[in-house]
Amino acid sequence: MGSDITAEEIAKAAKVAFEESQLFPAAVRIDALAKIRQQLEANKAEIFAANKLDMEAAQVEVDAGKMSNAMMKRLDLGKGDKWDSMLKGVQDVADLPDPTGVVSYTSQLDDDLELYRVSCPIGVLLVIFEARPEVVVNIAALAIKSGNAAILKGGKESNHTTHLLAKAISQGLSQTSLPSTYVQAIQTRAEVSALLDLDRYIDLVIPRGGNSLVKAIQNSTRIPVMGHADGLCHVYLDESADSQKAVRVVVDSKTDYPSACNAAETLIVHTSLLNTVWREVAQALLAADVHLLCDSHTLSALASLPNVPERFSSHVHSSTESSYSVEHLDLTISVIALPSLHSAIQFINSHSSHHTDSIITESERAASAFCRGVDSAGTFVNASTRFADGFRYGFGTEVGISTGRIHARGPVGLEGLVTYKYILRSKAERGHTVGEFGVGEGKKSFKHAAIATTSVPF
């Protein structure tokens, strides 16, 4: 956005674009996603060149101690299959069923008087994120498919990349009948601060980033905020845990992408496993270059081995109370031994961020108790916490992960970006009035009979 356009004008334009878009068929939104993907592919070289500039600037910040390595890694659009996954996410979202217009409740109140509860877009989304530039595309795809307008603000550390990604999105939209202001990008913190006051135009704020960003947003606006402040994920080794499963799941949960919010940060070991499974898991973690912050019990179990593990002196340290409240975001994991499943559940509920937690167990009873007792958006059995992801869940991509309890929880895909409205339709010749119903002579009673349909009949 140009500096001569105020935050209120940006927000108002988004609201107008949203309202205009509601009259377009779903096919227009699908076409827009196809055009955006084409523009991204056509501009890949230029986008990667911009990403290289951001990475070089980030390295200077890391060297100066002003940025963490974890933050810099999130900037890299060329890491692994991130680019291809981003493009596939756009196509996957386009291929998903339309989340709007879905009937979830019906009631025939009277002859020719029908009530429908129908899904509809939320409105205008303000999405604020740090580092990961691909979030621009993820959010835009989900917003467009779900019928929401979006205002996007990336972190300054990814300015070059996000500018070109937003440009490609704008170029794609310009080839459709959707308003050009349907997805907008802003650049400054001042614009964000001003937008957070505009609850007249903006319907939902979605922050994606570190604890400080999310907390600052939550404390600065009257607009509803959806997101999570931390990713303090746990893996619990139950007394019946299989050693091979434990090694595979724990190592993957910690090392697959250590700076991700769904990476494991704390490992809980049942005390009966200290001299067996724990030692195997610990040696596998050390072999993967993971630093262990151990309580006295887990530390003693390693120190008493006949052959002390390689890297023991450099990678194994005593934990402190604060170790279990830290989102490490690197190759470090806190470890504690506890005597029971019940104590593990209590520990997780009091220390976690209610994101994702996993149990390794061969007991169906323990698995059931864990999944019911742990108060988190995701509770897994014998599976890596890294599965907590909209793409892996089949959502195409995700707008973020919500640890709240209202509206949306866990990875938020299309269904999390719609709400609902009630449509009441009278087909009677004279219409219906509420005065016709009640108790007494000449009054009618409501029928409240279900209607066999999955769509509104007009």
Image (tube, rainbow, N blue to C red):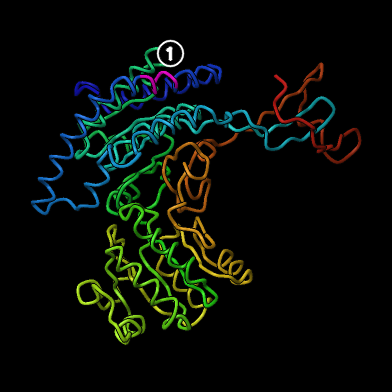
Q: Residue at x 76, y 27 (%)?
A: 433
Q: Start and end of the magenta stretch?
A: 34-38
Q: Is residue 334 above or below residue 99?
A: below
Magenta region's main secondary structure?
helix
Point out residue 331 in the picture as x, y percentages from the top left corner: 28, 61
Q: Is residue 383 above or below residue 453?
A: below
Counting other residues with Cα less than 10 Å from the Cα at mark 1, is it few (<14), some (14-19), or many (20 or more)?
Answer: some
**Res 305 quadrant in image:** bottom left
Q: Secondary structure at mark 1?
A: loop
Q: Residue 263: x and y, percent?
A: 37, 57
* Quadrant that contains the N terminus: top left
Q: Going by the image, does 38 lie left or right of 189?
A: right
Task: Please give the residue where the numbered disc 1 appears in the rendered image.
Answer: 176
Q: Is residue 342 above or below residue 406?
A: below
The residue positioned 70% from the left and 25% from the top of the image is 456
Q: Nearer the viewer, residue 405 or 314?
A: 314
Location of the C terminus (image quadrant): top right
At horizontal 51% and vertical 30% (from top left) the residue drawn is 146
Q: Residue furthest front?
A: 307
Q: Position of residue 168 (x, y in %)?
A: 31, 22
Image position, residue 147 (x, y; %):
50, 27
In magenta segment, residue 118: no
Instruction: Examine the structure image and report whether residue 36 is included in the region drawn in magenta.
Output: yes
Dot 1 amino acid type: Thr
Viewer-nearest residue: 319 or 101: 319
Q: How many marks?
A: 1
